[in-house]
Image (cartoon, helix red, strand yellow):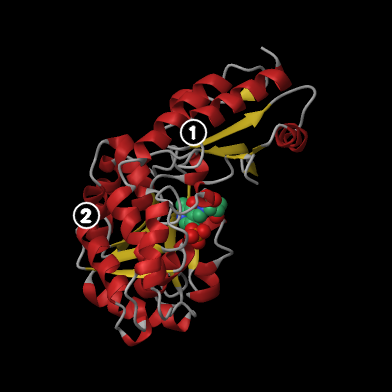
Amino acid sequence: MTDYSDFRSDTVTRPTKKMRECMAKAVVGDDVLGDDPTAQELEKLSAEIMGKEAALFIPSGIMGNAIAVKIWTQELDEVIVEERSHIYNMESTQMTFISRVQPRPLPSDRGAMDPHVVEENIRKPNVHIPRTSLICLENSHNNWSGSVVGIENVRSIKEIADRHNLKLHMDGARIFNASHAAGIPVKEFAEMADSLMFCLSKGLSAPIGSMLVGPKDFIDFGRRIRKVLGGGMRQVGIIAAAGIVALTDMTERIKEDNARAKRLAAAIAKFPGIVLNPDEIDTNIIIFDLDHPQYGIPDFLEKLNVQRILALPTRGGIRFVTHKDVDDTDVDKVIAAFQSILGS
Ligand code: TLP
């Protein structure tokens, strides 16, 4: 794959040299027994960065979201989710499978649900219907082409949640992308959420892992649920060491991914058959549709593949994601490929 320009996802990023060095040197212990100092350091650092009481290192983003739903809900409950959200569409119904609760998907303006609509959809207590207990938001929003859900929208929804005694969980898989784009510290987004999950394994380039942050009793219970789900990892400091480098060295670099996506979007939007508004690209994800007499999405992806460019078919068309392991040369290669396939 080395000669490919791989824009399928920021999950393809490889660990940095420093990550590998720190992994090799990591002091480890049995984390399930509570004595891996490196995992504990990563959890402490994550909690500090997000301004929360505690944090839990989890193997994947989905497990973090699943633990949060499990803790904040009871069977027979309902969870308000945005209709294109990852938690609703791309987590193989973890919510119903693990927590036995029902999602209530709501429409949005590029990921931002109307607070009034959210409030209208909170169920009134009644024996026939589920109880609403949780609202989930996603920031940045993957399936809305990496859009940022603005802090004012998040704040309004949090106020509603508080007024109705509901919890708010944020899927912040790419919260650092959202934070840079909005010019708002991650802490401010986290403050609006009772719990937040963010990924180390995406733009931050760690090989594995995500973090769940929230109140101490929530995280203590989360640790038990992680174990039950098979996520108790033993000498996990080896991986946590890379996570520490991700948080200390890699968060500022995320700006470059956002900027590169804007440049790429502006260039490819000009080609005939590309349905894309480049002004809507806030962060590192570009989703565009194809309206071309000659090519459907599979043919177009195949043409790109021949030129050693990888992208993903997704809801709404084709997805390109910028990240550490694609640079300006890769972006130029994509623009040249579009030129050769589509003309001008
Ligand atoms: N997203 C992956 C795929 O599932 C599509 C990707 O390549 O973008 N929340 C959001 C918003 C995500 O985008 C993802 C991963 C997750 C949660 C789940 O993270 P993992 O893959 O670590 O379980």
Task: Tell me the CA gap for discs 1 and 2.
Answer: 33 Å
Give percent across and percent down for residue 326: 51, 37
Between 37 and 59, the one nearer to me in the picture: 37
Identity, as a three-letter code, of the amino acid under mark 1: Asp
Which residue corresponds to mark 1?
327
SS for dot 2: helix
Measured from the top left, where is residue 138 in percent x and y? 40, 50
Q: Is residue 125 visible?
A: no
Name the amino acid type tagged 2: Glu
Q: Mark number for residue 191? A: 2
Picture quarter containing residue 253?
A: top left
Residue 82 percent across, percent down from the top left: 46, 50
Q: Residue at x 39, y 50 (%)?
A: 204
Q: Residue at x 35, y 62 (%)?
A: 22
Quadrant where the C terminus is found in the figure: top right
In terms of depth relative to the viewer, which is nearer, 222 or 14? Answer: 14
